[in-house]
Amino acid sequence: MNTIGILGATGAIGSRTLKLLQGKYKLRTSYLRNERQSTEDCEYMRVDVSKEEDLRKFMDGLSAVINCAGASYLNGERVSKIAGELKIPYIDPSGETFLEDKLEELKKDNIFVLSSGYFPGLTGVLMRNTCEGFDEPLSISGYSVSEEIPSQSAIEDFILTNLSGFGVTGSYYEDGQIKRDDTPVVEIIQNMPYQLTNYLSVEAEHIAREFNLKKANWYNASFGEEIIGKLQQAIIEFRQGSDRYKETIKEVPKLFEEKLKDIEGYTYIYVEGQGTKNGMLYSSKSSVKCSCSSELSALIAASTAEFVLKNKVDPGIHYAMDLLKPEDVIARLEDLNVEYKHRESLEQIFEVGKEDSFEEYEEGVI
């Protein structure tokens, strides 16, 4: 039986990934401080991810390893390189573009799957599902809003991931080019107004180029001035090489607690696309709502590990959205009692090839 290793298995994403894989595979999982007792199908090992010796011992004999041990920006290179040397498929719920250059010499001999969480990850799967639903997809847009109290590790990962360049702030894709537009727009989400700004993620650009879209937008929701100010302070401190940024990050969950004290926590993803089918213009709208974003990240991480072990995947660097079948992911969302909605509507009948007919269709803000 294949053995899957889960680093950080006592954390929010790791513990949920473990539950999704338990009973299907032998598991080897790590903890750092609070000792756990091994069972017949789940072995626990104490691992300090900063120590190469610990990581090599943990990965010995694994069929695949999922890295849920904190901010990938801090440990992803170390863990993924050891996995690459040992030729063990590496799956990272975070681990975006900054890792690609680091793995250049190892990618020809091993499988690396990055962006295997909810964003990036599930968001890309939903964009792909939308585009594949058309004969000719034309445009796509979407956003993700999370009203949850994040852990310190999640905040650190968010800051460092954005510094590493997973997207371009104030930008969108149009006709093969990246264009600037940092004008905020307001969208009513779950009966609340949110200020959104363009943030062209690597996922959105990847989908736009693969499907030759006319336009692609991804939007980020503002956290509010006080929280943004604290995040910016932490970024400045990190860039200055000061460990003070870690203390600043500790203050952020308290700000979220105050902001969300009267709100039931949730994460909401929305994706909308336009395209043609049988010579007619259609609009497709999908949404996912969940009380815990870690559930969504765990689903993509676990699904990716299963896919890699069950299918022939070529060595190289992949994104989860390029491997997973959208229909399989959506079916599993429903099994987890995650609220998934999809609606498709006819917008206009026109003759394919006549541009003036398409221009009569007025696209919404989002």
Image (cartoon, rainbow, N blue to C red):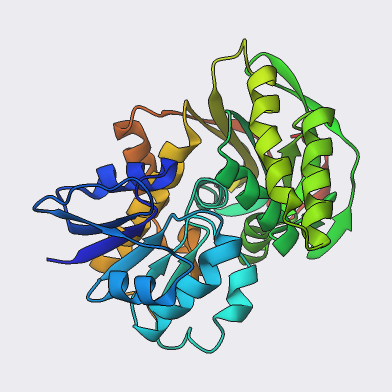
In the picture shown, does residue 98 fall above or below 294? below
In the picture shown, does residue 85 fall above or below 3? below
Residue 175: give x, y in percent of width and height: 80, 61
In the picture shown, does residue 356 fall above or below 262? below
Residue 147: give x, y in percent of width and height: 61, 26
Residue 8: give x, y in percent of width and height: 39, 53
Give the residue furthest to the top: 262
Side (left or right) of 58 relative to 71: left
**152 or 66: nearer the eye?**
152
Image quarter (top left, top right, bottom left or bottom right) of the N terminus:
bottom left
The part of the image, by quadrant, that contains residue 223 is top right
**34 or 228: nearer the eye?**
34
Image quarter (top left, top right, bottom left or bottom right) of the C terminus:
top right
**54 or 256: nearer the eye?**
54
Q: Tell me if residue 31 can be seen.
A: yes
Residue 117: give x, y in percent of width and height: 49, 50
Q: Tell me if residue 348 can be seen.
A: no
Q: In percent of the image, x 36 and y 71: which residue is there?
A: 54
Q: In percent of the image, x 14 and y 48: which residue is there?
A: 23
